[in-house]
Image (spheres, rainbow, N blue to C red):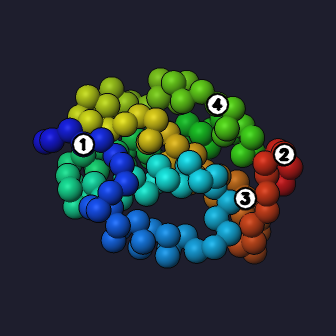
Amino acid sequence: MTTWSPGLGDEASAASEHAVALRGLGDPAPEPWRAAETRLYPLVVADPELYEAAVTLVHEAAEVLRARCRSVADLARLDPSDVLDRCPSAQTATASGVDPGTAVDAARACVCRELTVVPGGRRTSTLDGQR
């Protein structure tokens, strides 16, 4: 398996455009967190094994964030190393070439969307910790 450093480039254009189209307008996740997700998408074609490791780490990080965060502000305050310390695959994924910061930010984007959806599917801001 090759080590890949996630970054936007020509190889990411088609996947990135598709990801933007799926998210639509009004995504509540801050841009750096959305960008982390976008950097992971090209891995599915470039290095499927690394993509699998990245998705596993993102899933584990999201579980940690769900357990520890009740607002978007909580997501922003939580130290990534505290999240990674609770992810069983963090060491292996990082050794394989997954950028741990990118994985945590992608997980933050996912959980941010969950925190900003109210019953009925409408979004609301929780930046101040309010629902």
C-alpha separation, residue under disc 4 versus residue under disc 3: 18 Å
Foreground mark, 1 or 2, reads 1
Q: Secondary structure at mark 1?
A: loop
**Residue at 79 percent of width and 57 percent of height:** 125
Q: What x and y, as percent, mark residue 113?
A: 64, 58
For disc 1, the marked residue is 4
* Mark earlier in primary sequence (3, 2): 3
Q: Residue 116 bears which disc, if any? A: 3
Q: Describe residue 107's horizontal placement relative to residue 53 as left or right.
A: right
Mark 2: few/some/many CA within 10 Å (<14, 14-19, 20+): few
C-alpha separation, residue under disc 1 versus residue under disc 4: 26 Å
> Mark 2 and mark 3 in contact (Cβ < 8 Å)?
no
**Residue at 46 percent of width and 54 percent of height:** 37
> Mark 3 and mark 1 in contact (Cβ < 8 Å)?
no
For disc 2, the marked residue is 128
Q: Nearer the viewer, residue 72 or 16?
A: 16
Q: Amino acid at mark 4?
A: Leu
**Residue at 32 percent of width and 57 percent of height:** 9
Q: Secondary structure at mark 3?
A: loop
